[in-house]
Image (spheres, grey):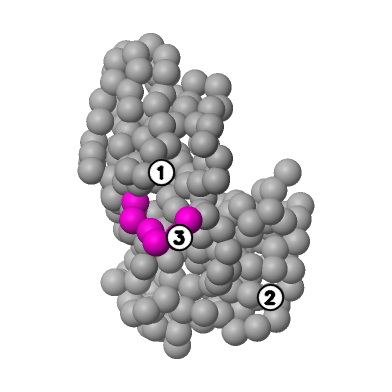
Amino acid sequence: GAVVSQHPSWVICKSGTSVKIECRSLDFQATTMFWYRQFPKQSLMLMATSNEGSKATYEQGVEKDKFLINHASLTLSTLTVTSAHPEDSSFYICSARGRYYEQYFGPGTRLTVT
Amino acid sequence: AQTVTQSQPEMSVQEAETVTLSCTYDTSESDYYLFWYKQPPSRQMILVIRQEAYKQQNATENRFSVNFQKAAKSFSLKISDSQLGDAAMYFCAYRNSGGSNYKLTFGKGTLLTVNP
């Protein structure tokens, strides 16, 4: 139980385009999901907290207009990187908060912007 | 704000031996949770073990155990009988017991190498 999926697992896009990453809780409902960014050999950096049916809460320094988060249902949250640039290339990980407040992590999405 | 410090960027251990990874944290809260996560080369985050601060007994999960010293704000992970599959990045994490959305604060990680 408590499986979280992400799609796509790897995406390459051209500079200036937008890309959407999906995070799904497959066998449980998640009122809260989290989005992280991870650079090579570094720790996870929390970008934002996504609550179903309300606006996401962004961490300090994260551009909300650049990283659009939508949590329209209890099993799906999406992260859209708008007008992507090479510096947005990174590994993006989502997690979903379970019933007892545990966080279950998705397998991550590697974004490469050329 | 809470902080988590992992002072060992890299550690190595011989297969079948025991290794201890260090973690210290800073908080003004009295009730909280501590976690160790493993991130293998696949980059999938895997929960290894968790500890509730109100419990005095150290958590144990098979070959993994912790030494939780609340007064010292220390939370080390001991891996016994190390296996090649234990090679990974290990992150220590902190979470308040309540509050906004139960966010995790991660340390910078320790890269564990297991030598055959």
Q: Which mark is residue B2?
A: none
**Which mark lies nearer to you, 1 or 2?**
1
Work out whether disc 1 and disc 2 sit on a shared chain: no
Q: Chain of mark 1?
A: B
Where residue A73 appears, x then y in whole percent?
Answer: 74, 73
Name the foreground residue: B55 vs A19. B55
Q: Secondary structure at mark 2?
A: loop
**Which mark lies nearer to you, 3 or 2?**
3
Work out whether disc 1 and disc 3 sit on a shared chain: yes
Q: Chain of mark 3?
A: B
In the image, farthest residue toward the bottom: A65
User: Which amino acid is tagged 2?
Assistant: Glu
Where residue A19 appears, x then y in whole percent?
Answer: 50, 74
Report how far apart the C-alphas of labels 3 and 2 lie in the structure: 28 Å
Report how far apart the C-alphas of labels 1 and 3 lie in the structure: 11 Å
User: Which amino acid is tagged 3?
Assistant: Glu
Q: Chain of mark 2?
A: A
Q: Secondary structure at mark 1?
A: loop
Could you tell which of marks 1 and 3 lies nearer the N-terminus?
Answer: 3
Task: Identify the residue under disc 2.
Answer: A52
Task: Identify the residue under disc 3.
Answer: B29
Q: Residues within 10 Å of mark 3 (few under 14, many from 20)?
A: few
Task: Identify the residue under disc 1.
Answer: B70
Q: Secondary structure at mark 3?
A: loop
Q: Main secondary structure of the magenta part?
A: loop
In the rendered image, the quadrant that contains the C terminus of chain B is top left
Report how far apart the C-alphas of labels 1 and 2 lie in the structure: 35 Å
Where residue A59 appears, x then y in whole percent?
Answer: 42, 76
Work out whether disc 3 and disc 2 sit on a shared chain: no
Task: Report the side of B70 relative to A42 (left or right).
Answer: right
Are the residues flagged by discs 1 and 3 in contact, CB closer than 8 Å?
Answer: no
**Which residues, given as a range, are shown in magenta?**
B25-30
